[in-house]
Image: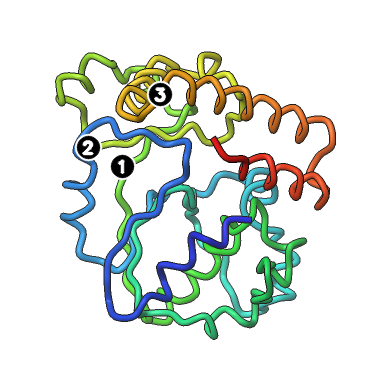
Protein backbone atom coordinates (compact mmCIF):
# COMPACT_ATOMS: atom_id res chain seq x y z
CA UNK A 1 0.00 0.00 0.00
CA UNK A 2 1.38 3.42 -0.98
CA UNK A 3 0.73 5.40 2.22
CA UNK A 4 4.11 7.07 1.83
CA UNK A 5 2.49 9.27 -0.78
CA UNK A 6 0.40 10.88 1.94
CA UNK A 7 3.26 11.84 4.25
CA UNK A 8 4.18 15.12 2.46
CA UNK A 9 0.64 16.32 3.17
CA UNK A 10 1.43 16.39 6.87
CA UNK A 11 4.58 18.53 6.68
CA UNK A 12 4.35 21.84 8.61
CA UNK A 13 3.42 24.94 6.66
CA UNK A 14 2.10 25.28 3.13
CA UNK A 15 4.64 23.78 0.75
CA UNK A 16 4.05 22.41 -2.74
CA UNK A 17 5.42 18.99 -3.58
CA UNK A 18 5.39 16.49 -6.44
CA UNK A 19 4.76 12.78 -5.89
CA UNK A 20 5.74 10.24 -8.55
CA UNK A 21 5.55 6.48 -8.91
CA UNK A 22 8.86 4.77 -9.66
CA UNK A 23 7.82 3.71 -13.19
CA UNK A 24 7.87 7.27 -14.54
CA UNK A 25 10.26 9.15 -16.82
CA UNK A 26 10.26 12.82 -17.76
CA UNK A 27 9.92 13.55 -21.48
CA UNK A 28 10.58 17.27 -21.17
CA UNK A 29 10.22 20.26 -18.80
CA UNK A 30 7.01 19.06 -17.15
CA UNK A 31 7.85 21.00 -14.00
CA UNK A 32 7.41 24.23 -15.96
CA UNK A 33 3.85 23.21 -16.84
CA UNK A 34 3.05 22.25 -13.25
CA UNK A 35 4.47 25.51 -11.89
CA UNK A 36 1.95 27.44 -13.98
CA UNK A 37 -0.85 25.92 -11.88
CA UNK A 38 -1.49 27.81 -8.66
CA UNK A 39 -4.05 25.39 -7.20
CA UNK A 40 -3.35 23.30 -4.11
CA UNK A 41 -3.50 20.03 -6.05
CA UNK A 42 -2.84 19.13 -9.66
CA UNK A 43 -4.05 15.86 -11.16
CA UNK A 44 -4.57 14.58 -14.64
CA UNK A 45 -8.27 13.88 -14.73
CA UNK A 46 -10.02 11.77 -17.32
CA UNK A 47 -13.69 11.29 -18.03
CA UNK A 48 -15.79 8.64 -16.35
CA UNK A 49 -14.23 5.36 -17.53
CA UNK A 50 -17.27 3.09 -17.21
CA UNK A 51 -18.66 0.89 -14.47
CA UNK A 52 -16.26 -2.03 -14.94
CA UNK A 53 -13.13 0.09 -14.69
CA UNK A 54 -14.54 2.10 -11.78
CA UNK A 55 -15.02 -1.12 -9.83
CA UNK A 56 -11.60 -2.50 -10.76
CA UNK A 57 -9.45 0.61 -10.39
CA UNK A 58 -11.31 3.07 -8.13
CA UNK A 59 -14.15 2.00 -5.85
CA UNK A 60 -17.20 -0.14 -5.34
CA UNK A 61 -20.00 2.40 -5.76
CA UNK A 62 -22.55 0.44 -3.73
CA UNK A 63 -20.06 0.01 -0.89
CA UNK A 64 -19.15 3.68 -1.08
CA UNK A 65 -22.80 4.62 -0.58
CA UNK A 66 -22.72 2.70 2.69
CA UNK A 67 -19.52 4.45 3.80
CA UNK A 68 -20.75 7.92 2.78
CA UNK A 69 -24.46 8.00 1.79
CA UNK A 70 -24.35 11.65 0.77
CA UNK A 71 -21.39 11.38 -1.58
CA UNK A 72 -22.09 11.96 -5.26
CA UNK A 73 -19.82 9.98 -7.55
CA UNK A 74 -18.12 12.46 -9.92
CA UNK A 75 -17.91 12.10 -13.68
CA UNK A 76 -14.10 12.11 -13.65
CA UNK A 77 -11.20 10.18 -12.10
CA UNK A 78 -7.42 10.49 -11.86
CA UNK A 79 -4.44 8.16 -11.74
CA UNK A 80 -2.78 8.54 -8.34
CA UNK A 81 0.71 7.74 -9.64
CA UNK A 82 1.62 11.39 -10.15
CA UNK A 83 0.27 14.56 -8.60
CA UNK A 84 1.17 17.92 -7.15
CA UNK A 85 0.00 18.52 -3.60
CA UNK A 86 0.30 21.12 -0.86
CA UNK A 87 1.14 20.47 2.76
CA UNK A 88 -0.50 22.17 5.71
CA UNK A 89 -4.07 21.72 4.46
CA UNK A 90 -4.89 18.27 5.85
CA UNK A 91 -3.80 16.53 9.03
CA UNK A 92 -3.63 12.85 9.81
CA UNK A 93 -6.74 13.30 11.92
CA UNK A 94 -8.65 14.20 8.73
CA UNK A 95 -8.08 10.62 7.59
CA UNK A 96 -9.01 8.75 10.76
CA UNK A 97 -12.49 7.87 9.48
CA UNK A 98 -10.84 5.99 6.63
CA UNK A 99 -7.31 4.99 7.70
CA UNK A 100 -5.99 3.00 10.66
CA UNK A 101 -2.68 4.67 11.49
CA UNK A 102 -0.79 1.65 12.71
CA UNK A 103 2.45 0.17 11.38
CA UNK A 104 1.89 -0.33 8.53
CA UNK A 105 -1.18 1.90 7.98
CA UNK A 106 -4.24 0.34 6.38
CA UNK A 107 -7.58 1.40 4.94
CA UNK A 108 -10.66 0.77 7.04
CA UNK A 109 -12.66 -0.13 3.93
CA UNK A 110 -10.32 -2.02 1.59
CA UNK A 111 -13.29 -3.80 0.02
CA UNK A 112 -14.64 -0.43 -1.13
CA UNK A 113 -11.53 1.42 -2.29
CA UNK A 114 -9.48 -0.22 -5.05
CA UNK A 115 -5.82 -0.21 -6.12
CA UNK A 116 -4.34 0.81 -2.82
CA UNK A 117 -4.93 4.50 -2.24
CA UNK A 118 -6.03 5.36 -5.77
CA UNK A 119 -9.72 4.79 -5.23
CA UNK A 120 -9.67 6.31 -1.78
CA UNK A 121 -7.87 9.49 -2.85
CA UNK A 122 -10.27 9.98 -5.76
CA UNK A 123 -13.03 9.95 -3.17
CA UNK A 124 -11.19 12.02 -0.55
CA UNK A 125 -10.04 14.81 -2.87
CA UNK A 126 -13.47 15.10 -4.48
CA UNK A 127 -15.15 15.33 -1.10
CA UNK A 128 -12.74 17.93 0.30
CA UNK A 129 -12.67 20.14 -2.79
CA UNK A 130 -16.47 20.19 -2.92
CA UNK A 131 -16.41 21.30 0.71
CA UNK A 132 -14.14 24.18 -0.29
CA UNK A 133 -11.19 22.94 1.75
CA UNK A 134 -8.74 22.74 -1.17
CA UNK A 135 -8.47 23.82 -4.79
CA UNK A 136 -7.64 21.42 -7.61
CA UNK A 137 -6.49 21.81 -11.21
CA UNK A 138 -6.54 19.27 -14.01
CA UNK A 139 -3.58 19.20 -16.38
CA UNK A 140 -2.77 16.65 -19.11
CA UNK A 141 0.88 16.15 -18.14
CA UNK A 142 1.04 12.32 -18.14
CA UNK A 143 1.24 9.83 -21.02
CA UNK A 144 0.34 6.21 -20.30
CA UNK A 145 0.68 3.19 -22.63
CA UNK A 146 -3.03 3.28 -23.50
CA UNK A 147 -2.51 6.75 -25.00
CA UNK A 148 -1.49 6.66 -28.71
CA UNK A 149 0.93 9.53 -28.04
CA UNK A 150 2.93 7.27 -25.72
CA UNK A 151 4.58 5.45 -28.61
CA UNK A 152 5.21 8.74 -30.42
CA UNK A 153 7.75 9.88 -27.83
CA UNK A 154 11.18 9.86 -29.45
CA UNK A 155 14.41 9.28 -27.55
CA UNK A 156 16.18 11.75 -29.81
CA UNK A 157 13.92 14.56 -28.61
CA UNK A 158 14.71 13.74 -24.98
CA UNK A 159 18.45 13.63 -25.63
CA UNK A 160 18.29 17.02 -27.36
CA UNK A 161 16.05 18.42 -24.60
CA UNK A 162 13.27 19.06 -27.09
CA UNK A 163 10.67 16.89 -25.39
CA UNK A 164 7.20 18.10 -24.55
CA UNK A 165 6.06 19.12 -21.07
CA UNK A 166 4.99 15.57 -20.29
CA UNK A 167 6.00 12.55 -18.28
CA UNK A 168 5.61 8.90 -19.24
CA UNK A 169 4.04 6.48 -16.78
CA UNK A 170 4.21 2.73 -17.45
CA UNK A 171 1.18 2.15 -15.21
CA UNK A 172 -0.31 -1.33 -15.42
CA UNK A 173 2.90 -2.91 -16.74
CA UNK A 174 4.97 -5.09 -14.43
CA UNK A 175 8.04 -6.90 -15.70
CA UNK A 176 11.64 -7.27 -14.49
CA UNK A 177 12.69 -6.98 -18.15
CA UNK A 178 12.53 -3.31 -19.09
CA UNK A 179 13.15 -4.20 -22.71
CA UNK A 180 9.75 -5.90 -22.92
CA UNK A 181 7.79 -2.76 -22.01
CA UNK A 182 6.18 -0.33 -24.49
CA UNK A 183 8.62 2.25 -25.86
CA UNK A 184 11.32 0.47 -23.88
CA UNK A 185 14.24 2.41 -25.32
CA UNK A 186 13.21 5.40 -23.20
CA UNK A 187 13.44 3.42 -19.96
CA UNK A 188 16.65 1.68 -20.99
CA UNK A 189 18.28 5.01 -21.85
CA UNK A 190 17.44 6.48 -18.44
CA UNK A 191 18.62 3.29 -16.71
CA UNK A 192 21.92 3.38 -18.57
CA UNK A 193 22.33 7.10 -17.81
CA UNK A 194 21.72 6.53 -14.11
CA UNK A 195 24.19 3.67 -13.72
CA UNK A 196 26.83 5.57 -15.70
CA UNK A 197 26.92 8.13 -12.89
CA UNK A 198 27.26 5.81 -9.87
CA UNK A 199 30.22 3.83 -8.67
CA UNK A 200 30.41 0.22 -9.90
CA UNK A 201 27.44 1.06 -12.09
CA UNK A 202 27.61 -1.99 -14.36
CA UNK A 203 27.81 -4.38 -11.41
CA UNK A 204 24.98 -2.65 -9.55
CA UNK A 205 22.82 -2.70 -12.69
CA UNK A 206 23.31 -6.47 -12.93
CA UNK A 207 22.59 -7.03 -9.23
CA UNK A 208 19.47 -4.85 -9.25
CA UNK A 209 18.15 -6.55 -12.39
CA UNK A 210 18.67 -10.00 -10.88
CA UNK A 211 17.01 -8.98 -7.63
CA UNK A 212 14.04 -7.47 -9.49
CA UNK A 213 13.62 -10.72 -11.41
CA UNK A 214 13.58 -12.80 -8.20
CA UNK A 215 11.05 -10.45 -6.55
CA UNK A 216 8.83 -10.56 -9.63
CA UNK A 217 8.88 -14.36 -9.76
CA UNK A 218 8.18 -14.73 -6.04
CA UNK A 219 5.20 -12.39 -6.23
CA UNK A 220 3.83 -14.01 -9.39
CA UNK A 221 3.91 -17.46 -7.77
CA UNK A 222 3.07 -16.73 -4.14
CA UNK A 223 0.96 -13.56 -4.43
CA UNK A 224 0.69 -10.86 -1.77
CA UNK A 225 0.77 -12.91 1.42
CA UNK A 226 2.37 -10.98 4.32
CA UNK A 227 5.21 -13.52 4.54
CA UNK A 228 5.96 -12.87 0.88
CA UNK A 229 6.23 -9.13 1.56
CA UNK A 230 8.52 -9.75 4.53
CA UNK A 231 10.79 -11.82 2.32
CA UNK A 232 10.78 -9.16 -0.38
CA UNK A 233 11.57 -6.45 2.19
CA UNK A 234 14.57 -8.43 3.41
CA UNK A 235 15.70 -9.01 -0.16
CA UNK A 236 15.44 -5.32 -1.03
CA UNK A 237 17.39 -4.47 2.12
CA UNK A 238 20.42 -6.52 1.19
CA UNK A 239 23.61 -4.47 1.13
CA UNK A 240 25.06 -3.88 -2.31
> Which residue occupies 18% across, 55% down?
35
Relative to residue 203, is residue 1 drawn left or right? right
Q: Residues within 10 Å of mark 2 (few under 14, many from 20)?
A: some
Query: Where does the image place residue 39, in percent across and percent down from the top left?
Result: 26, 66
Work out whether residue 229 can be spotted: yes
- State if disc 1 and disc 3 touch (CB < 8 Å): no
Which colour assignment does the render follow?
rainbow
- Comparing 155 with 37, the one in front is 155
Location of residue 63 (image quadrant): bottom right
Numbered disc total: 3
Q: Which residue is drawn at 30% across and 69% down?
A: 40
Q: Are marks 1 and 2 in contact (CB under 8 Å)?
A: yes
* Rendered residue at 66%/58% (across/down): 59
Q: Which of marks 3 and 1 is in front?
A: 3
Q: Nearer the viewer, residue 185 or 231?
A: 231
**Residue 165, numbered label:** 2
Q: Find out whether the residues at labels 3 and 2 contact each other: C-beta distance under 8 Å.
A: no
- In space, the residues marked 3 and 1 are separated at their CA atoms by 31 Å
Q: Which of marks 1 and 2 is nearer the N terminus?
A: 1
The numbered dot on residue 201 is 3
Camera-nearest label, 3 or 2: 3
Residue 134 falls in which quadrant of the image? Answer: bottom left
| Cα distance in 3D space between marks 3 and 2 | 29 Å
Mark carried by residue 110: none
User: Residue 4: horizontal and vertical position, in percent?
Assistant: 52, 61
Quick one: quadrant of the N terminus?
bottom right
**Residue at the spot x=22%, y=14% of the render?**
156
Mark 1 lies on residue: 141
Secondary structure of the residue carrying tag 1 is loop
Amino acid sequence: MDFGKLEPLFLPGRKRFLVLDSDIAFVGPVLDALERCSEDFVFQYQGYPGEEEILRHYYDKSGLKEVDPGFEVPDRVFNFGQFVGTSGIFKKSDFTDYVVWENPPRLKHPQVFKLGLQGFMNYFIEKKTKAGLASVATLPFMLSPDNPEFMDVQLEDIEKRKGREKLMHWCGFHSPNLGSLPNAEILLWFEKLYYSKVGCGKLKRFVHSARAYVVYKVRSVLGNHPEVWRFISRLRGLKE
